[in-house]
Image (cartoon, helix red, strand yellow):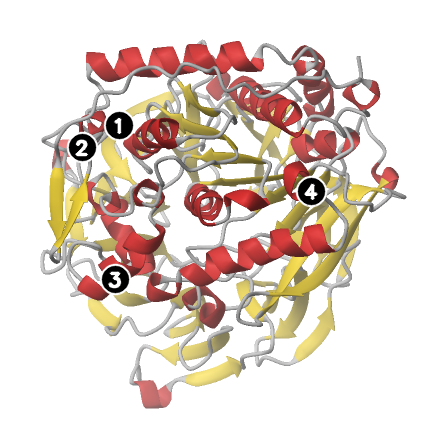
Amino acid sequence: MNPSSAVAPSLESTSSLTYPHARKVGQTDDYFGVAVSDPYRWMEDVDSAELKTWVDAENELTQSYLSQVPERKSMQRRLMELINFERYTAPARRGTRYFYSHNSGLQNQNVLYWQEGLDGEAKVLLDPNTLSTDGTVAISGISITDDGSLAAYSIADAGSDWVKWHVRDVTTGKDLPDIVEWSKFSGAAWLKDGSGFFYQGYDAPEAEALKAANYFHKIFFHTLGTPQSEDKLIFDRPDDKELNLGAQVTDDGRYLVIHQSKGTSPNNEVAIKDLQHPESTIVRLIDLADATYAPINNEGTLFWLLTTVDAPNGKIIAIDLNHPEREHWKTVIPESANKLSDISIIDNTFIANYLADAQSLVELRSLDGQLIEQLKLPAIGTAYGFGGLREDTETFYQFTNFTTPGTIYRLNMKTQQSTLFRQPQLLFDPALYETTQIFYGSKDGTRVPMFISHKKGMMLDGSAPTLLYAYGGFNVPLMPEFSSSHVMWMEMGGIYAQPSLRGGGEYGEAWHEAGTRLNKQNVFDDFIAAAEWLIANKYTSAKKLAISGGSNGGLLVAACELQRPDLFGAVIAQVGVMDMLRFDKFTIGWAWKEEYGSPSENAEEFAAIYKYSPLHNIKKGGSYPATLITTGDHDDRVYPAHSFKYTAALQEAQAGTEPILIRVETRAGHGAGMPLSKRIEATVDQYAFLVRELRDGMLGE
């Protein structure tokens, strides 16, 4: 049955749920004279038998609750129909070969292909679906040599951030014996001659790999045909254990560019090594991380960089290695009113991709910065890609919005004309839906944009179930993007709303900083104001309003449900950072101190964090909206104990009749690389939860 024509069951929330017992311990910590109880500290041992028993019981309760939604199976069938279309990535040329990934529709993982020329026969380079029976092994990174003969690829198991690098001969499809382990947050940067590659990693963890903190990132070089034990340490910073490193080789093969940033701060230093002289010392080109410095390309010793120095929205500068002092830096493209989010050089032309009110605006500019023309895009939406080499005369990009899946265009750089290259065939009519962008005022008067999508002609009388989704952090912009699940939500009669909160990257670094550290409450205020605007303007009502977010967005929705439990009918908090006093104790969590502040090292930041930390702001006897918490048992980005502790505490405190449930995915991490089958199951469970909690108005009722 098509859910759009289904009738929602009349289901009441129940106050008779019996939650699995969660033992409490007498753990108390002192933060600057404030005693903070942590009764579920034992849940940080995620491999304990006691915790496994609790997780199994919680999963059983959740599935029992969701199984009472009769249309759950029809929703799953419809979502599989909507997602069953061919998906491609934009092709990338290496030598005479083009590389791209493809999914026939319902494959768990995308398959990597190559072909000779644009019209050549497609050949499988790597099919990760053959690497595991359950689809939980994924390609997390790929790097091709300049001549297209070799591919370094990294494999992530069960969604872990830890990856293992292999090398495949493109022509034969066979792997070389080379294997590199204990790599994390890394790409592979090949030498021009393909004799080896640079990568980043850590020393092998002495403690349990899922939990141990990761410090002292390092750059190594692997020579093909040699064991990893002989890999050379190229660069490290023993003076600062919290630096993250990156490495790239310039297109001409002359230089190794080394990126150094503190935690998750967008600001960085840059060092350069001359690869033509292997014994040369590494030169610290930019030794002060006072802004973002992202190298774009070079011509000999002249480097172009995207930077935010004295330009929060970004500008392009040129630095000559022969005269690297700041007084010799030249501005090529000055800062504009829009954020410059990405830039490349193709056919000796800058392709500048700006964010204009959270949607793409693309300009072509000459190497001296002069505007050639603005690229005409199909509609309001997001354009990305524009990769390639300086000498290429073509590039490819994808365009997407809320009702348009990734459609690939070929841009002829000589004529500046875009032609359709690949377009998905869909099982729904995009013309039935509309997207508008509105602006609303936050608590302090800040103007915040929000996209709203729904069926055309919908009556705005406050009765429509609405899903409000946001992120608001880490300089990440939320832009129009296609999702089959959002189409199904709108097909079922729902409204989808997506605001661009402070803390994100929609309006440059000033917008980001306005939602960090001591300013984090601004993000919650922006989100709450979005909810209030939707209600005041008759899109929905509080009892019909659901909120959802993941990771930093999981923190967002949890904090907001505690601050305004009256404002929401349902909450879905995915892989959230819930214990804000201990986020820096696990894996890469310490890096987030640049975003959130340091709860154990700075008294003022502790006080600010303690006021909104979800785990510490649950009021016993409070009445909270229906809540579904989700996490993965192998999440080594946001340690799953965050969700476990929050669930146990919220279940104990709940005095209202609405359910507090948790769904724990097995053999899954933070979300990256999750097989399609698991993603579909997770989405259907979330929508079944919303159908039950929001009741009438869904599924055509």
Q: CA distance from mark 4 to mark 3?
A: 34 Å
Q: Is residue 700 left or right of residue 92?
A: right
Q: Nearer the viewer, mark 2 or mark 3?
A: 3
Q: Are marks 2 and 1 in contact (CB under 8 Å)?
A: yes
Crowding around mark 4 (Cα neighbors within 10 Å: few <14, some 14 to 19, many 20+) is: many
Q: Foreground: 93 or 88?
A: 88
**In the depicted view, which residue is nearer to us: 307 or 402?**
402
Which residue in the structure is indicated by mark 3?
Answer: 605
Question: Which residue appears at 77% of the width and 63% of the height?
Answer: 415
Amino acid at the residue labelled 3: Glu
| Above-or-below relation of 468 to 609 | above
Structural distance between the alpha carbons of marks 2 and 3: 42 Å
Camera-near label (4 vs 3) is 3
Seen at 22% across and 70% down, the residue is 284
Dot placed on the residue nearer the N-terminal end, 4 or 2: 2
Residue 386, how many percent across, how many down?
60, 54
The numbered dot on residue 228 is 2
563 and 374: which one is in front?
A: 563
